[in-house]
Amino acid sequence: MKAFLALVRAEAVLLLRDRIALLLIFLFPLVFILIFGFLMGGRGGPQSARIGVALASGTDSGALEAVLEGAASLRVTHYALSSALEEAVAKRDVDFGLVWAGEKLVFLYDPSRVQENFAFQQLAQGIATDFNLRRQSVSPLLAAEKIDLGKKAAANSFSLLVPGILAFAVLSAGLFAVSGHLTAMKERKILDRLLVTPMRPVHLLAAIVVVRLAVVYVSTLITLFVSMTVFRVSFDVDWPRYTLFVAASTLGMMGFGTLIALVVRRSSSAGYLANILGMVMMFLSGIYFPIEMMPSVLRAVSRALPLTYMAEGMRYTTGVAEISGLRFWVVTAVFFGMAAVLLPVLARYVMVPERR
Amino acid sequence: MKGILWVARVQLVTALRERETLFWFVIFPVFILALLASVVGSIGKEGEMNFDLTLVNLAKPSSASVDFAAIVERAFEETGKPPAPGKQPLFTLHRPAPGEDSQAFLVREEKALRIGRRAVVVVLPEGFNEGILGRAGGAAAGPSGSTGGRVLVYYTKGSDASEIAASIVEQVLAGVDQRILAESGRFQTAASVPTETRWVGVGATEIAYVDFLLPGVILMGFFLSGLFGVPGSVLFARDRKILQRYWVTPLEVRQYLAGFSLGHLGLCVCQFFLLLVIGRYAFGAKVLFAELVPVLFLVLSAVTFLAFGFFIAAVVRTANAGMALANLLNMPMLFLSGLFFPVRGLPLVLKAIVYANPMSYLVEGLRTSLGVGAREFPLEVTFGVPLLWIAVCTVVASRRLQWDVGR
């Protein structure tokens, strides 16, 4: 036990002295959170669309004015001339425009806003439908009543993104923690020297795991805290399950990192491979793009990636999405299982003196 | 000159032989192109989006001649059919099996929605038909006045897919509403005011998403080559004392530098043509690069990111530190440039990063010169700021970069 504690202390000091590792573990998720928090908060969309309107004088525009007044999601700016409105759309002073000269509703869009125009076109379609009904003094017979069944904490897409970024941070730290650290120790011949001491390899491995686990957990807490204070998103965190899941997924990913350590020799190669795997998983696991909107092939790939389940579990434990209790426990058990199977493999095949 | 060409050849061949290089410079940009084109590019396109929708009809057939709930059901059945062979239906419909208890099914489907297995659940409640008849008879004037004709659309706020699916459901219902009103003679379809879409600004035509995306992905490829490839190659070669072996030959540092840069630019040329061919033939991009200004922007981009790579190599001590710094700069520079997401509405600090980021100017310059982007900065600025970056990076690198650790 004394030897193990000494190893834990040594590993902790090593990690705290390793500015690069600390930078990646603590700063990386924070940078992501800050960028995406502000990008998503400031992204234009149907909630905050600015419409410019040019109504020709002498036209019956009462119905149109009433429709626009009733649309709470629109901020309306009036222009005297359609040419001025066109200029405003092109300059992005407004998101899209509407010209009414008494014959047809002309909607103006800026073609370079490729990613946003779909939302504006949907709003335009709603305006046209309401306008036509109102003009003929007809009330709609059908009324869609939207009811949100999501979790209270899931106020917007950003609150769903934060647990995804936490999951990615756990994945990166877990993948690289063992593979990178051990291969670096091997490369510098430190492992060879340690292995000739009475130290048991499993103690060294356990010390690395314990230190990294604690650091990753603290990193997720800091990221969560920053996102809550800077962006005022609230999470309904189930702390026991959160702690358990962070531990399970970090251990699982450390186990997964074993496979990397088995196939590469250099720490730089381990870093490259971990980086590549992380990047591919990040884009396919539903963190940035909803899985439902991917082509069927990518959906199948997504379901095979551990990060998909990590993001799902993190969303569940932070209270922004639901999964069944059974699914949560199965996923948690699988991650613990991965660690239980793969970490001994690491101790057996990676933590051995280098052949000369 | 021979030495320079030799180093250029070595640099190019080595890069093409390395699996990591191939991933970051070729596979990753193609992956991003494919992913964004298929996910973001499919939004709003019929036949390319598919959502799981549950439809539950709790309304009993009306004693009147028209079963409105059945009309709504038929409208959703239509959306459950693919618009063309090989295309995806808009909705994959989930409905209770014959004889199944609808309420129990609904409870189950609400749970499926909560856990993300359904995008939206549409319920036609009891009294739906009577409600519509009541409204048609003038019982209620507006949606909030009566529960009649109400369609319950359950969704999950915050989930992009669910929110898009719910808004499409609203459109489907608006269409059904107009059809019912028209058939009942209350609404004159012929008297409807037509709508027209007009594109103003850049080129005044609609821009395909892939045409918007491809120049950005090419720049991303150049950026990754510079950010990871340059410091990676230089610092690892230095740390492993490969460079030291060069210095015992008659080759000088400036010759090595020229050869390395030439080889890197050669790699960018290979990368550009590969992405162009894939973009054009696999994703249908039509954007044309064969004009002077876009070519100038491409060259400027490759040189800017090459200089930026040397800058990173100059400010760190080891190859691992270089890779860490590159990793840290990667996402902020990519995402805070307008390359993938619009960057308006950012706070001052992040706006300052956007304005300082050379990628912001290069991406705008390239897209506007290709007619697929709007101009925010004057042309001189889009050229000038990257040139300034090149100058700063060159000065820093020439003063700080150590070519030989062991000398």
Image (tube, helix red, strand yellow):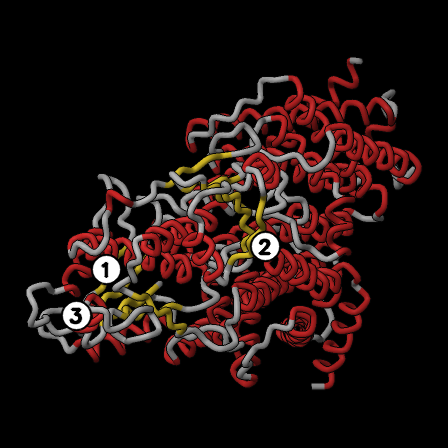
Which SS class for mark 3? helix
In the picture, the disc for residue B115 is none
A297 up-or-down from A204: above or below: above
Q: Amino acid at mark 3?
A: Asn
Mark 2 chain: A
Rounded to the nearest whole Å, what is the CA distance between mark 3 and mark 2? 41 Å
Identify the residue at horizontal 48%, vertical 66% (top origin). Answer: B158
Residues at marks 3 and 1 touching, judged by CB atoms closer than 8 Å: no
- Residue contact between numbered discs 2 and 1, judged by CB atoms under 8 Å: no
The subunit carrying tag 1 is: B
Q: For residue B93, which numbered disc appears in the image?
A: 1
Q: Is residue A27 above or below residue A200?
A: above
Instruction: Compare residues A337 and A126 and report the one nearer the observer.
Output: A126
Residue extending farthest to the front is: A58
Residue corresponding to mark 3: B129
| SS for dot 1 | strand
Quadrant for the N terminus of chain A in the image = bottom right
Marks 3/2 same chain: no
In percent of width and height, residue A275 lies at 61, 52
Residue carrying label 2:
A43
Name the mark nearer the viewer: 3 or 1. 3
